């Protein structure tokens, strides 16, 4: 069969996914070409605000001291958090040195408790799931826009819509993965590495793994910040952090916190480590799969500053799954990391941002 015939045969057999892909491309072109004047003005104001904050650094430090003097409880929380971070970094350094010593002596850094299951799906199936996910994403966005226009919801809450949209997409992502695994391939939830048989052990492994990688993540972050200062690159704030910093409604912030610290990590681990990694591993081998899946994971976060820290974190998440055959350690690490980031963001919002 000629290459042209193979392509046509593939398109016929996968016509539903091809149509979804065409819809995604068309929708993306429409979004790119659609004018965003108001959004551009808002981003420009945010950029000016960041520049002003640097110029007022001395005044900001004075304001922080005043806040901490008035709020002793907050001061104690920050002191305790700084002490805990220092202890964790010291423990992480010890674990890193121990791991390096084991590696140099030819021994394994971590005992293998299991391995990811041999799955029936392939990389093509992972790509199909991605196409379905983005199709539903654009379909949901257009539905929201149509409802807003039809009912003239000019005063609708953009931030609430953004958070709810992200939450719904995480649920859709989980549903798509479960559909492919359970319905299409007649597998079970354990096929994704989800097992609570050794729950406490797996959580402990996740905590130790996160502590061990903390010094590496800190070093990467220091290097990235130094490069940014040299290049004078101004990294835009992520949408989640923008909402957290600028909004003060408890219910919205609670939904956002749950989304970032629990729902998001579970959805991402089910897809990247539980679903995508075993398929890529079967095709390309362990090392290539760890690097490729982690690189895609970091790239899709669309954050230049955080790319290398997220890449390092992604490698740890895949490594833990490879060594345990359980997704619980990876989920534990992801939840802990996002919780730490959100906690620090709240502290920054309280003491550093102007009221």
Image (cartoon, rainbow, N blue to C red):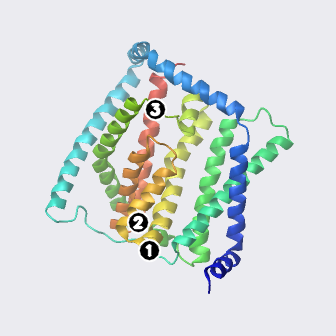
Q: 221 and 62: which one is in front?
A: 221
Q: Viewed as shown, does residue 90 lie left or right of 50?
A: left
Label 1 Cα crowd, 10 Å radius (few <14 / some 14-19 / many 20+): few
Check disc 1 and report the residue beneath it: 283
Residue 231 placed where, x, y %?
A: 41, 32
Label at residue 233:
3
Lower sequence index among marks 2 and 3: 3
Q: Are marks 1 and 2 in contact (CB under 8 Å)?
A: yes
Q: Is residue 230 above or below residue 174?
A: above
Label 2 Cα crowd, 10 Å radius (few <14 / some 14-19 / many 20+): many
**Circle 1 SS class:** helix
Label at residue 64:
none
Residue 253 placed where, x, y %?
A: 57, 36
Q: Viewed as shown, does residue 303 lie left or right of 143?
A: left
**Circle 3 SS class:** loop
Check disc 2 and report the residue beneath it: 289
State which mark lies toward you, 1 or 3.
3
Q: Is residue 242 above or below residue 98?
A: above
Whole-number angstrom distance, CA of label 2 to CA of label 3: 32 Å
Residue 244 placed where, x, y %?
A: 55, 33
Query: In the rendered image, which quarter contains the N terminus?
Result: bottom right
Q: 22 and 75: which one is in front?
A: 22
In the rendered image, which quarter is residue 187 located in? bottom right
State which mark lies toward you, 2 or 3.
3
**Circle 2 SS class:** helix
Lower sequence index among marks 1 and 2: 1
Q: Is residue 274 above or below residue 157?
A: below
Query: In the rendered image, which quarter contains the C terminus?
Result: top right
Lower sequence index among marks 1 and 3: 3
């Amino acid at each position: 069969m000629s290459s042209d015939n193979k392509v046509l045969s593939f398109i016929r057999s996968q016509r539903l996914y091809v149509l979804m892909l065409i819809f995604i491309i068309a929708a993306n072109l429409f979004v790119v070409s659609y004018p965003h004047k108001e959004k551009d003005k808002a981003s420009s104001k945010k950029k000016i605000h960041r520049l002003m904050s640097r110029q007022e650094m001395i005044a900001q430090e004075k304001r922080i001291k005043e806040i901490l003097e008035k709020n002793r409880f907050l001061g104690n929380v920050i002191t305790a958090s700084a002490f805990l971070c220092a202890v964790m970094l010291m423990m992480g350094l010890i674990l890193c040195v121990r791991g390096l010593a084991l590696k140099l002596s030819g021994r394994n850094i971590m005992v293998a408790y299991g391995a990811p299951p041999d799955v029936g799906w392939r990389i093509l199936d992972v790509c199909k799931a991605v196409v379905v996910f983005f199709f539903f994403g654009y379909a949901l966005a257009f539905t929201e826009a149509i409802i807003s226009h039809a009912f003239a919801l000019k005063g609708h809450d953009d931030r609430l819509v953004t958070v709810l949209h992200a939450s719904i997409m995480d649920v859709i992502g989980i549903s798509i993965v479960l559909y492919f695994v359970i319905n299409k391939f007649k597998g079970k939830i354990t096929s994704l590495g989800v097992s609570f048989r050794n729950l406490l052990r797996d959580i402990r492994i996740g905590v130790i793994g996160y502590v061990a990688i903390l010094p590496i993540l800190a070093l990467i972050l220091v290097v990235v910040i130094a490069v940014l200062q040299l290049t004078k690159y101004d990294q835009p704030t992520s949408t989640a952090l923008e909402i957290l910093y600028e909004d003060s409604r408890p219910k919205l912030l609670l939904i956002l916190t749950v989304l970032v610290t629990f729902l998001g990590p579970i959805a991402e681990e089910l897809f990247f480590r539980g679903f995508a990694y075993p398929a890529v591993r079967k095709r390309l081998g362990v090392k290539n799969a760890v690097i490729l899946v982690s690189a895609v994971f970091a790239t899709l976060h669309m954050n230049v500053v955080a790319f290398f820290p997220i890449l390092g974190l992604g490698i740890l998440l895949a490594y833990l799954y490879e060594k345990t055959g359980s997704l619980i350690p990876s989920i534990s690490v992801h939840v802990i990391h996002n919780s730490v980031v959100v906690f620090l963001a709240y502290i920054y919002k309280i003491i550093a941002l102007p009221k």
